[in-house]
Amino acid sequence: MRRPPRLPGLLVRLLLPSGLAGRILGDLDEEWTEHVRPARGSLAAGLWYWKLALGSLVSVGWSRLRGGFGAQMHAAARASPSLRGRGKTVGWWYDAKMAVRSLSRSPGLSAAAVSVSALGIAAATVV
């Protein structure tokens, strides 16, 4: 087998947007050709390709079901012209806002994270 398996590539092309599918398949094909196939042999390399192609489909599907973070950022940038072209500052602010939101959804984890951080800062200050 000189080329990666065709069926997983076809599934990725059919089920994902063309730009994303092209990037994923380009990376998989390059890795398969240069590193995995020479090191593992054709059968193991084919199984590796299947595993990563299907894993990519599951990952993208899951993030879409959950309304992935990247989708939220792009939607916010499209909805608000003031966010476009602002550079890293808006990205940092948006990241901080999303972190606070996610911590507020699980107060127990938030309390544990804040207390562990406070304990670490206090210990570093004492030393």
Image: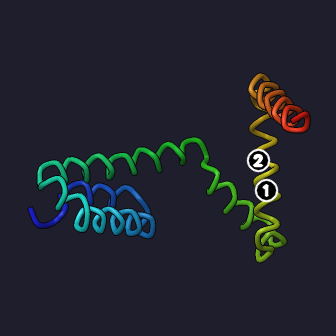
Res 120 → quadrant: top right
The residue to which callout 2 is attached is 98
Residue closest to the far top: 108
Left or right: 29 in relation to 92: left
Q: Which residue is drawn at 19% across and 62% down?
A: 4
15 w.r.t. 98: above or below: below
101 w.r.t. 12: above or below: above
User: Residue 110, percent across and down?
Assistant: 79, 30
Are the residues flagged by discs 1 and 2 in contact, CB closer than 8 Å? yes
User: Residue 3, percent across and down?
Assistant: 15, 66
User: Which color mode does the image show?
Assistant: rainbow
User: Residue 14, percent across and down?
Assistant: 33, 59
The residue to which callout 1 is attached is 94
The kind of residue on which mark 2 rests is Met
How busy is the neighbourhood of tag 2: few (under 14 within 10 Å), some, or many (20 plus)? Answer: some
User: Residue 82, percent across and down?
Assistant: 84, 71
Nearer the observer, 122 or 6: 122
Nearer the observer, 20 or 35: 35
